[in-house]
Each structure stands twice: as structure tokens, then as C-alpha cells.
Image: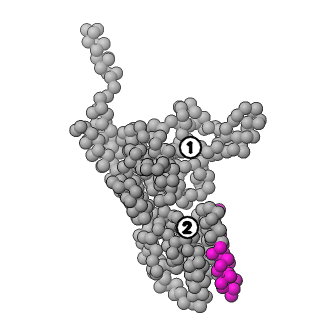
């Protein structure tokens, strides 16, 4: 009798077989008992890409899915030097990751600093010390990784969950990879793309990868036209660019406008940066025009936000925005052509001053464009995407059972 009981006890402690593990994962997927993980760069300043990532995560959390945001804390060099001098030993202090600049509710999201062990601790510049955690995923889980982090893709090759790239920029897709590397080398076969151009680019350089499209929504509660278009001021909004060269080209276009149109020197340019989304929308709403000079955007939202505010766009017809740029909804220069951009700006301002631009008719074109980019449509598609991945993952696991 004792021998039988001992055998029973041994049987109870045996690890589940691979088939049992697969069945358990399928059951959890069918019951929505899984976690959706996001790797998020811990940038302290506003970022459109991080905003989109967190908006997707928030949509899943609000739907009732379990969501975890993973990030690697960023070292604050100045605080670390001061702490090291005070402690007379090397001390590392980190910035707190708190993306409170987003224009939607993220209070329900859980943020997890990545650590090498369960007892890792992260001292912050705020004086807090928070716990860090090793990444913990399961076969029924999903993990979204931004396109510009092949190091994370490589480090997670051995994890058991389904990994998906969230592609918001064509420029960073190959930037961090070795020559000849593609995402399939890291075992990744699935991508969510936010623009037609990014999808086409990925298909061209990584044939066979499976792409799902997600159109971003413009929040019309924040971006809306003024009650009276006569309130528009002779102001041209702009964003200076991603780097020194882009900034120089933008400022050159502005100076060329003044040089070629001395009679328009009463117009003013306003830089639209370093402000909350609400203030950004308010300033944009005041402008008669916005100058769009992002020639490498994966999907530029500034032109769409301007249209929603009744603000006319003069800008580059960048590849990332080709799905919404056409002659009726803006003054579009060939991508990167500063001379054409400056010339178009002069033509556009002259038309505005002479009263040739019928605001009501033009706004109809803007609204027709914006119908494709609604918050509701984005939220609906976001939920459709995870449902599709859930079904595909179930089929994938069932296929593994048959092998």
C-alpha cells in the first residue's frame, strides 16, 4: 500500500507533457486567459510612436485583456555622477518613465521595468526605488515589439509567446540590423503596420511576412475646426524636424519664403513643439497654414490633425503619407524639395490673402480624407487584430499537436 501511494505522489509531481502544455495554452486562448505584452522605449519626451503603442495597449486593457508594458529604465548621467560622488562608489540613478503627456487614459496600464532577476531594484531621480522584473511570458501570450528594436527581437528568440512587430517607421526597420538580416531570422513572422507605404516596404524587403494594417485615428475631441474661420490668424505653424539637417532645411524654406515674398513679412511662423496635445491643437487651430517638412515619416499625422483644425497644409508629399495626400487637400511638394516647398508656400499664402480659398468647400475635402482615420475605426481595428491573432495562434498550436 505504501509503495502505491509513493508512486501516486511521484506521478502528481511530473511535469506536464508537451501535448498537455499545448492543450492548456489553447484553452487559455479560447477563454481570453492570456497576457498581451508590449516592449516600450522609455523616452521622457512626447513621442507619436509611443503614443500609438500605448493607445493600442490601453484599448486592450479597457476591453478586459491582461496587458503589461515592459521597458528598460534610462540612466540619468548627471544624477548618477552626483550620487557616485556622494556615496564614494559607482552608483547608477535612473529617470522615471511616466508618459503622462498622452491625450488618453493610461491609468489602468501596468508598467514593468525589466531586470535581470526577481530582486532587482531601480533607484530613480525622484528618490523612489522600484522593483524590476525579468520578462515572464507563456505560450498563450502575445508580445508587441517596435520595429526599431532588433536587439529585443534577438534577445527574445527563445521565448514561448507569439511575437509581433509594431511597424510605425520604415526608416528604422533595417537601421539596427546587420546586412542581410530580416525579422524572420529572429523567428518573427507577423507585423502590424500603420501605413500603406510601410506595408509595401516590408513586403519588398521581407517577402512572406504576414502584415495586418492599422489606420490611426485623429481625435476630433481635441482636433476640431474653430467656430469662425475668420478667427484664423496670419500664422504658419511648423515643426523644425528630426535632426540638424532637417531643421536647417525647414528654416531655409521659411527664409526663402520671406526673401521671395517681401510683401508677406507681416506673416509669422510658430513652432509647434514642447506642449501638451491640447495646447498643440489650440495653437494649430489658430494657424492659417501648417508647414509639413517630415520627409521620412512612416505615417505623418500632422497634416491630418491640421485638416481637422481647418488649417491648410503646405508640405512634402512624403511616402508615408501617400495614402491621404492629393491635390484637393493640400499644397504638396515633391518629397525633400525645399525650393518647390517654399514656392508653394508663397502661392498658398497669396491665395489665402486674396480670398481665393473657399474654406467651406476645402473643408469638405478635408472631412472626406479624415473619414478614413477615426478614433472609433482605430479602436475597432485594434480589437479585430488581436482576435485574428488569437485564432491564428490556436490554429498554430493545434498544428503543432499533429506533428
Give the residue drawn at x 32%, y 17%.
Answer: 9
- Looking at marks 1 and 2 on the same chain, the residue that comes earlier in the sequence is marked by 1
Expressed as whole percent of the image width and height from the top left, the position of residue 220 reads: 50, 69
Q: Is residue 170 left or right of residue 77?
A: left
Badge 1 is on which residue?
72
Q: Is residue 30 above or below residue 118?
A: below
**Between 105 and 57, the one nearer to me in the picture:** 57
**Between 275 and 197, the one nearer to me in the picture:** 197
Q: Is residue 258 magenta?
A: yes
Where does the N terminus fall, quadrant-wise? top left
The circle on residue 294 is 2
Q: Residue furthest top?
A: 2
Give the residue drawn at x 67%, y 45%.
Answer: 76
Q: Residue furthest left?
A: 402
Badge 1 element: loop
Figure quadrant of residue 312: bottom right
Expressed as whole percent of the image width and height from the top left, the position of residue 166 reads: 44, 54
Q: Is residue 281 magenta?
A: no
Where does the C terminus fall, quadrant-wise? top left
Q: Is residue 189 above or below residue 370?
A: above
Badge 2 element: loop
Q: Is residue 52 above or below residue 393?
A: below
Give the residue drawn at x 52%, y 64%.
Answer: 296
Q: Nearer the viewer, mark 1 or mark 2?
A: 2
Expressed as whole percent of the image width and height from the top left, the position of residue 3 reads: 27, 9
Q: Residues within 10 Å of mark 1 (few under 14, many from 20)?
A: some
The circle on residue 115 is none
Figure quadrant of residue 33: top left
Q: Which residues are magenta?
A: 252-274
Give the residue drawn at x 52%, y 72%.
Answer: 335
Amino acid at each position: 500500500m505504501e509503495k502505491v501511494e509513493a508512486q501516486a505522489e511521484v506521478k502528481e509531481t511530473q511535469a506536464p507533457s508537451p501535448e498537455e502544455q499545448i492543450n492548456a495554452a489553447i484553452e487559455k486562448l479560447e477563454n481570453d486567459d492570456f497576457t498581451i505584452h508590449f516592449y516600450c522605449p522609455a523616452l521622457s519626451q512626447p513621442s507619436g510612436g509611443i503614443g500609438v503603442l500605448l493607445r493600442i495597449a490601453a484599448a486592450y486593457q479597457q476591453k478586459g485583456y491582461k496587458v503589461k508594458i515592459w521597458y528598460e529604465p534610462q540612466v540619468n548621467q548627471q544624477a548618477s555622477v552626483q550620487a557616485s560622488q556622494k556615496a564614494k562608489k559607482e552608483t547608477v540613478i535612473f529617470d522615471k518613465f511616466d508618459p503622462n503627456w498622452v491625450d488618453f487614459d493610461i491609468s489602468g496600464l501596468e508598467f514593468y521595468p525589466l531586470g535581470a532577476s526577481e530582486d532587482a531594484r531601480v533607484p530613480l531621480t525622484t528618490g523612489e526605488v522600484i522593483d524590476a522584473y525579468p520578462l515572464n511570458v507563456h505560450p498563450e501570450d502575445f508580445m508587441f515589439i517596435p520595429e526599431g528594436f532588433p536587439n529585443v527581437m534577438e534577445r527574445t528568440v527563445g521565448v514561448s509567446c507569439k511575437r509581433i512587430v509594431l511597424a510605425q517607421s520604415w526608416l528604422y526597420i533595417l537601421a539596427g540590423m546587420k546586412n542581410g538580416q530580416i525579422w524572420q531570422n529572429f523567428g518573427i513572422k507577423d507585423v502590424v503596420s500603420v501605413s500603406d507605404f510601410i506595408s509595401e516596404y516590408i513586403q519588398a524587403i521581407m517577402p512572406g511576412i504576414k502584415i495586418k494594417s492599422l489606420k490611426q485615428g485623429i481625435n476630433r475631441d481635441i482636433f476640431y475646426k474653430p467656430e469662425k474661420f475668420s478667427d484664423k490668424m496670419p500664422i504658419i505653424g511648423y515643426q523644425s524636424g528630426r535632426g540638424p539637417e532637417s531643421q536647417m532645411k525647414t528654416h531655409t524654406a521659411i527664409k526663402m519664403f520671406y526673401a521671395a515674398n517681401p510683401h508677406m513679412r507681416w506673416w509669422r511662423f510658430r513652432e509647434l513643439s514642447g506642449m501638451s496635445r491640447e495646447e498643440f491643437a489650440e495653437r494649430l487651430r489658430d494657424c492659417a497654414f501648417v508647414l509639413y517638412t517630415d520627409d521620412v515619416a512612416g505615417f505623418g499625422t500632422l497634416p491630418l490633425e491640421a485638416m481637422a483644425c481647418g488649417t491648410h497644409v503646405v508640405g512634402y508629399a512624403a511616402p508615408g503619407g501617400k495614402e491621404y495626400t492629393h491635390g484637393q487637400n493640400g499644397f504638396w511638394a515633391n518629397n525633400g524639395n525645399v525650393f518647390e516647398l517654399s514656392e508653394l508656400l508663397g502661392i498658398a499664402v497669396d491665395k489665402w490673402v486674396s480670398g481665393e480659398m473657399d474654406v467651406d468647400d476645402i473643408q469638405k475635402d478635408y472631412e472626406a480624407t479624415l473619414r478614413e482615420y477615426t478614433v472609433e475605426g482605430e479602436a475597432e481595428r485594434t480589437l479585430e487584430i488581436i482576435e485574428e491573432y488569437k485564432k491564428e495562434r490556436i490554429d498554430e498550436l493545434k498544428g503543432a499537436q499533429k506533428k
